[in-house]
Image: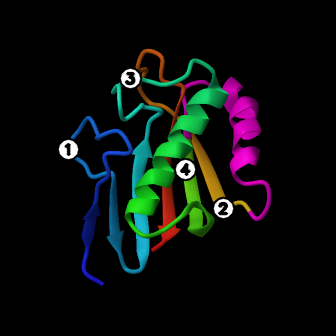
Amino acid sequence: MARQIVFTTKAAKPPALYSQAVKAAGLVFVSGTAPIDAATGAIRGTTIQEQTAQCLTNIRAILEEAGSSMDKVASMTVVLADEDDFAGMNEEWLKWFPSDPPARQGAKLPARIPGLKVSIAAIAEA
């Protein structure tokens, strides 16, 4: 399988010089995805639950564009601005992955972006 760049207008365009996702070796590698509303370009939600839901909505749209889906996610990286938001992020996470969730790792955002509480990256089967 040749390396393929994935892009959809149903998720926010990355603000930097990177792709929403790359499809390669039978996998889809989704870049860190912020809770940006594709229609407005603004952060959507003020709570960690709302922002987590928007990140996952964006990831779902990117995966679907790549011919994959949320049930094919093998691993995700969740990056939080504030570790105190972990419980709230998990609350929303359980709605998306009530059983057989993907592997997951976490980290803390190295820089503060006003209003941004979370960013999520994913690796899924193509």
Mark nearest the camera among 3 and 2 is 3
| Tag 4–tag 1 contact (CB < 8 Å) | no
Say left or right for 103 vs 115. Answer: right
Q: Which residues are magenta?
A: 79-100
Disc 3 is placed on an element classified as loop
| Category of crowding for the residue at label 1, using alpha-carbon neighbours closer than 10 angstroms: few (below 14), some (14–19), many (at least 20) | few
Say left or right for 44 vs 13. Answer: right
| Tag 4–tag 2 contact (CB < 8 Å) | no
Question: What separation in Å lies between label 4 and label 2 (alpha carbons)?
Answer: 10 Å
Q: Identify the residue under disc 3.
A: 42
Disc 2 is placed on an element classified as loop
Q: Is residue 29 above or below residue 36?
A: below
Say left or right for 18 vs 61. Answer: left
First in sequence: mark 4 vs mark 2: 4
Mark nearest the camera among 3 and 1 is 3
Q: Identify the residue under disc 1.
A: 17
Image quarter where the N terminus lies is bottom left
Task: Classify residue 111 by image quadrant.
Answer: top left
Q: Which numbered circle lies on residue 77?
A: 4
Q: Identify the residue under disc 2.
A: 102
> In percent of the image, x 51 and y 40: which residue is there?
55
Question: What separation in Å lies between label 3 and label 1 (alpha carbons)?
Answer: 19 Å
| Tag 3–tag 2 contact (CB < 8 Å) | no
Mark nearest the camera among 3 and 4 is 3
Disc 1 is placed on an element classified as loop
Q: Is residue 115 above or below residue 91?
A: above
Q: Position of residue 122 (x, y in %)?
A: 50, 56
